[in-house]
Image: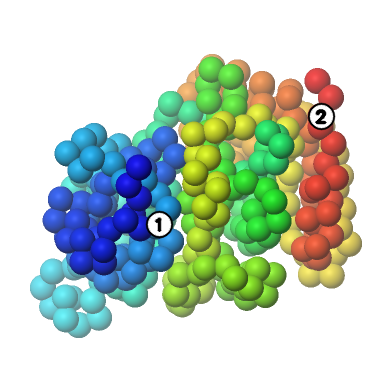
Amino acid sequence: MLTVASLSRNELNKRLAGVGLVVRTGPFVSRIHSPIAQIADGIALLYGDYPLVDENGFADFHVNMRRSAGLRRWYKPQVRFDLDGHEPFEPLPEAHAFPMLEWALNWCISTRAHSWLTVHAAVVERNGLAAILPAPPGSGKSTLCAALVNRGWRLLSDELAMFRLADARLVPVPRPVSLKNRSIEVIRNYVPDAVFSVPVGNTTKGTVAHLKAPSESIARADETAQPAWIVFPKYESGAATSLVPIPHARAFFRVAENAFNYSHMGAAGFQTLTAVIDGCASYDFRYSNIDEAIALFAALERPRQ
């Protein structure tokens, strides 16, 4: 199977500027068009292990990352995202092009992929059992996720927990992990050989960099996982590491609040989420020490059915 890394840089640039780079991430195929150097740089650095798809074949999403026209092409150049001619985002400075691509791909899935119940959460797996980490920005979710996947856990996603309706199993979408502000340096120090995109400052989320997904996680993107734990993380400076069980009913409503399409799915969404909650142990988690957090996750017990 050919991967993005099998392309020369000239061929990568040619595809991006021409018919599009057609790449598979989990169950999705995206056709990415862009003449912007930052897009090619980010893809070459972080997407080398992802499989290429026949450029004449079907793609779920046709993503176009282009420059603004007119004077903006020369004065404070901007990048625009459109999906099939629709522009859901405001233009951003061209330096923000690669983070914008990642946000655009997340938007495509969260707004268009309704064959799964999709929740805003990181997901990691070990020994066939998955921990789901739903949390708002600033909670330390992505920092914890990045640390776990560099200590023996498989990355299913940093942003999207996707539950299969037939059996409530988790479908992987392993893509680069988005880290912000202080978290970038924390993970650089914790994983010295980690591969990061160039940090981009002054975004709406502060300074952003993306961490390359582990090659093994990408290679196992067809392997679903059994939900086992729902952990609502919260980083608090100086806080003692604590894991507190919470009732199923409270966990249900908190996960539903983090879902992108729960209300859209009606009865199917309710039944799927009920199955997930019934099969998982749910917790509130506070931490400030990453090593203690890793040790606690390693000691999680299989839920009783």
- The kind of residue tagged 1 is Tyr
Which residue is drawn at the image coordinates 38% and 38% (left, top)? 28
Relative to the observer, which residue lies in front, 15 or 31?
15
23 left or right of 99 in image: left
x, y percent for residue 285? 79, 50
Could you tell me if residue 191 is visible in this image?
Answer: yes
Query: Badge 1: few (under 14), some or many (20 or more) residues near its Cα, within 10 Å?
Result: many
Image quadrant occupied by the N terminus: top left
Q: Residue at x 64, y 53 (%)?
A: 149
SS for dot 2? loop
Q: Residue furthest bottom?
A: 75
Task: Measuring from the top left, give residue 274's x and y in whole percent.
Answer: 66, 22
Q: Are marks 2 and 1 in contact (CB under 8 Å)?
A: no
Q: Is residue 1 left or right of residue 178?
A: left
Q: Quick check: 44 above or below 268?
A: below
Rendered residue at 84%/24% (across/down): 304
Closest to the observer: 89 or 4?
A: 4
- Please tell me the numbered disc located at residue 109: none
Question: Where residue 77 sits: x, y (%)?
Answer: 23, 76
Q: Which residue is mark 2?
A: 303
Name the mark on residue 47.
Answer: 1
